[in-house]
Amino acid sequence: MTTPMGSKFDRRGFMKLTGSIAMAAGLTASLSACGGDNPNKKTSPGGGGASSAAGNSNGTITAAISYELGTSGYDPMTTSAALTVAVNWHTFEGLYEVEPTEPTKVYAALAADDKPKKIDDKTYEVTLRDGAAFSDGSKLTAEDVVYSFERVMDPKNNSMYNQFIGFVIDSVTKKDDSTVVIKLKFPFEELLANRLATIKIVPKAIVEKDQKKFDFNPVGSGPWKMTANGAGGTVKFEKNEHYNGPRPAKAAKMVWNIMPDPDARTNALTSGTVQAIDALPYTKIPTVKSNGFEQYSEQGFGLAFVMFNGSAKNPFSNLKNRQAFMYAMDIEKACKVAMSGQATPASCFVQQGHPAYQKAKVVYKRDLEKAKALFNETGLKKFRVIGTDHDWMKSVESIIVDSVQEAGVTIEFSQRQSADAYNEITDKPDAYDVFLAPGDPSTFGSDADLLMRWWFVGDVWDSRMHWKGQPAQKKFTETLEKAAQAVGDEQMKGWHECFDILSEEIPLYPLFHRKAPSAWDGKTLIGFKPISLTGLDFLDVGTTK
């Protein structure tokens, strides 16, 4: 892979572009009512879109994306930044993949069969599709698959993705060049493909030779290969000529302009500079529609959340202070005003409409008198709140901070770029009291177990939250692990118990679940579908340009 022609890769310049958090993040909300019918009703993967015109196989797809580069590069073992994850959907493959337009569905990617072959309750085999290769032309083998799983599962690498698989996968071994054997710690058939989808397959020889180089100029087996890594403000792709999977690129090239500024993104679309954008501001919907562009806001798990510092010396280790903050917030106003009605206050850890949804034991609605009484009881008068500076979060945070101060407390509030904010609080229990940010782990999978593991299992998030070791955390973990080993109604019951624990203890909790807006040129993009996840999806998309 190469950086833009005529330019040398500048790590400092790359790092200055940070601002995407080392996690999955949310997108801006907008008015779905202006978007017409949901284009996602079409069958996926493949086909369907705003135009039935023949595509230009030599054409270039252009887009503007709202999130900046993360600090960890593109290595799928470590990155979870919004932009890099979206790029990796196009350039890497897992054995199975989550369908971005329908996150509850998983399809065979590198795997030859629709689901793993069951040998016994704890043993499965996966055969690779014949002729699979990386974008440099090297053959993809079972050895690469084993290596990709082992590096994630190695504790020394501290991969966030291990929390999705390490609890259930005992080992991944090579049977022959095209087959791997997966040994489980307990039966997990129903969700196995979902978990396999979280691990992207990387070329062992290239990564072992120079992991840092691979991090910024990766080689994958997906339908696209990256040719410019965004250090110059643009991510560029070319069709991967060595790809032989089910979703080949339908254009020759693709260009993503990194545009955090919402006005710049919108102007890029309406001026014809790009064909699609994410995070369309709701105020721009009339402009976009009057210029003949398509727009839709897709409901998903994506949310804004509040996280409390649970370290022993922090005032928010006291549950009553956490409850007071929850009751003081005017979430209804935030949804109506800041999100223009395109968000729903949380009544459960997952959104209404999620297969595991059940109204939680505690649902927080504004009760200012209760909030005042709780703060008075604890004696808390002043504390610090840090928020991230995503464009839509700024107005949400302003409403939240103002409404909480109406409970008779003083807040020292500051905003940071996402990467800076997380660097400031990670492993620093004295750095903050309350944290506000967007999040969307459904980019990795949408089942309830995975969504909860993202935040509440492992050390990465606990290095910020400081919940581990507390009685409620132990109870939550035991309940989650028990549910993982259950099936059907028993599993669902366990997840509901976990939701209730989170609603009662609120170490980190959603404020609302939002709709994710995007806009596109339906006259030139063929097969484009808006998604509820963070980012843009151009799998199976063609262009007339």
Image: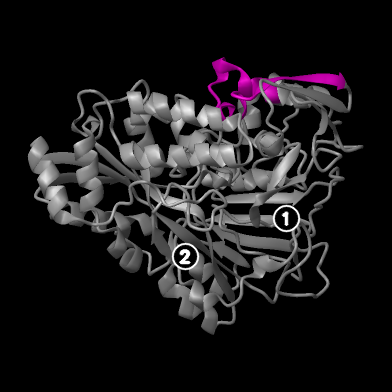
| Residue bearing the label numbered 2 | 264
Q: Amino acid at mark 1?
A: Leu
Does residue 139 appear in this view?
yes
Q: In the image shown, does 1 or 337 lie closer to the viewer? A: 337
Q: Residue at x 25, y 34 (%)?
A: 432
Q: Secondary structure at mark 2?
A: helix
Q: Eyeballing the image, is 257 above or below 309?
A: below
Residue sitting at the far top: 156
Is 156 covered by the magenta stretch?
yes
Q: How is the image coloured?
A: one colour
Query: Could you tell me which quadrant the N terminus lies in?
Result: top right
Query: Residue 454: x percent and y percent?
Result: 50, 36
Q: Amino acid at mark 2?
A: Ala
Query: Could you tell me which quadrant the C terminus lies in?
Result: bottom right
Q: Secondary structure at mark 1?
A: loop
Asked if residue 494 lies left or right of residue 134, the reply is left
Q: Residue at x 82, y 25 (%)?
A: 180
Residues in magenta, as a range: 149-175
Q: Residues within 10 Å of mark 1 (few under 14, many from 20)?
A: many
| Residue bearing the label numbered 1 | 539
**Circle nearer the viewer, 2 or 1:** 1
